[in-house]
Amino acid sequence: MQTASAVVREFWRLMATNDFHSVVAVLAPDFVLEWPQSSERIRGGERFAQMNAEYPAHGRWQFTIKRFVEGAYEVVTEVAITDGVQSATAISFFTVEKGRVTRLVEYWPEPYAAPSNRAHLVEP
């Protein structure tokens, strides 16, 4: 059986092909994706694949792993994502059981201007 780390690396490799239906191979039959910021939940690999395939893009999606933290059954990644025009960062918490991703919780942080009241304490 593959380690959680290997499964998540394969997930990102498959995402980079832009054949989002291929990603279903590493998702459990009862896979659930949660986006807490927008209070959305997607159940099932096919819905996950369809959502990614239908997402408006200006070109091929590129995924660059910036950070990879692994445990026995959980993996956290920080990934830079771009289609050449749009750019985002995803912080993804994967739960892996029996060689498949069962749960994925993602946060999509947006940059914001630093408050001026702490300018004397920070570096730009």
Image (cartoon, helix red, strand yellow):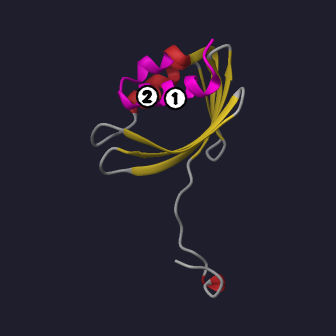
Looking at the rendered structure, the secondary structure element under dot 2 is helix
Q: In the rendered image of this protein, does residue 71 appear above or below residue 100?
A: below
Task: Please say whether residue 5 is one of the residues in the magenta stretch.
Answer: yes
* Residue nearest the observer in this picture, 3 or 119: 3
Residue at 41% from the left image edge and 24% from the top image edge: 20
Bounds of the magenta span? 1-24
The N terminus lies in quadrant: top right
Where residue 31 appears, as percent x and y from the top left, is 63, 20
Q: How crowded is mark 1: few (under 14 residues within 10 Å), some or many (20 or more)?
A: some
The answer to which image quadrant residue 92 occupies is top right
Q: In the rendered image of this protein, does residue 25 appear above or below residue 119?
A: above
Residue at 46% from the left image edge and 50% from the top image edge: 88
Residue on which disc 2 sits: 13
Q: Residues within 10 Å of mark 2 (few under 14, many from 20)?
A: few
Residue on which disc 1 sits: 9
Where residue 72 appears, as percent x and y from the top left, is 72, 27
